[in-house]
Image (cartoon, rainbow, N blue to C red):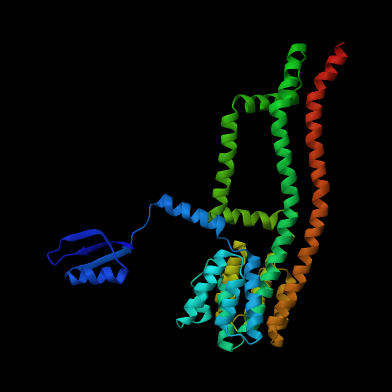
Amino acid sequence: MIFEFKSIKTNGETVEGKVEAESKQSVIDLIVGRGEQVVFVNEFEEKKLVKETKKAFAGLFGNIKEQDKILFARNLGLMIKAGLALSRALSVLERQSSNKTLKKITAKIQEDISKGKTFHEALSEHPKVFSKLFISMVAAGEESGNLANSLENISSQMEKTHKIVKKVKGAMVYPAVVIGVMIIIAILMLFYIVPTLTETFKSLEVELPFTTRMVIGLSDIIRDHSIIFFASLVLVIVLLFSFFKTKKGKRTLDFCFLHFPIVKNITKGVNSARTTRTLSSLLQAGVDYVEAINITERVVQNSYYRTVLKDASKKVEKGEPISKVFLDNSNLYPIFVGEMASVGEETGNISEMLQGVALFYEEEVEQKTKDMSALVEPMLMIVIGIAVGFFAVSMLTPTYSLVDAI
């Protein structure tokens, strides 16, 4: 490996350079051995473009699907429950895994455990693969001696969360595809069909109505400045995606999901289910109450819910019940969540109560996604009808004018 370093000689002179060595410590020993003071020693970074390219390819070909992680947790839990040692169970999973990235990570975890690390410590070396929720539940399982049960709970938690997200995304696919196809057809018509009709109208010298002139004008812009048009379209899409990746953009998107008529109830249901499901699983695994809330905060996707849970963590630490936090934020969490949490706190069965709430909202979200699909279909038909009607009227009106003139 190549390291870059900076050091100071006894006379105050600064020395900078690069050196090849086996480790960072070897470079430090070398500098100290020369009687110099170490300022810094860092592994020499590759060119940014090369690094970014590697990252991009890793993202394309090294992804581990959520389903793979679910099977990893479930199968590992079953093998440990059957009496296999952890290292042996990991070895079996490594051999049977079809995902090359997961296979390498499993081998590395096995190696770390053989060197004396605990399972959750080995998992924490791969934060992009295993979430804080996953690691915390494993840690709690190791401490309590119920690792197999913790892994089964993790797989169950992840599977239910995965299903609910998949159903919501599935409900969005149909309208997205229809709208996309509509836009493509509209551009093709403006590019090829409208110019033909325009030439006919010009040869007949027919007075064109406003809507027809508008369609023809849009067609002329697309045809005469096609490169600028498509480049601008791509630029707008890129800028929108870039904006929605920023903190402010995500906040804007989260606000829209919470207030847009068709999806706001589904958004609240999904976040309520995810909050209660995660919190219940962590508490059942034996994770500290405040730590469980902190982990749940990182699990929920919507920033408004994260803000509430961040506040809840501080209030619970001071002795305030979490049910009060839910009730005080009834614009995000339905009253039912706060009331059930309150009952759970009074009876000492909050994890079971929260699990019941999670099941309720998961079923509700499933039903609402079906209802949304049924509602979106006729709405799309109306939109398509209006678009087709507008185009037909715009293009046929001059023809009727010509017939009247004859």
Vertical relation: 391 (above or below) 327: above
In the visual, does 92 lie left or right of 28?
Answer: right
Q: Position of residue 109 (x, y in %)?
A: 51, 75
Q: Toward which corner of the image does residue 239 lie, by quadrant?
A: top right
Q: Toward which corner of the image does residue 90 lie, by quadrant?
A: bottom right
381 or 268, which is in the foreground? 381
Q: Position of residue 263 (x, y in %)?
A: 73, 56
Where does the C terminus fall, quadrant-wise? Answer: top right
Residue at the spot 70% in from the left edge and 37% down from the top edge: 184
243 or 87, which is in the foreground? 87
Q: Position of residue 125 (x, y in %)?
A: 48, 72
Q: Position of residue 258 (x, y in %)?
A: 68, 58
Where does the N terminus fall, quadrant-wise? Answer: bottom left
Q: Is residue 197 visible?
A: yes
Residue at the spot 40% in from the left edge and 52% down from the top edge: 48
In the visual, does 2 lie left or right of 381?
Answer: left
In the visual, does 261 lie left or right of 45?
Answer: right
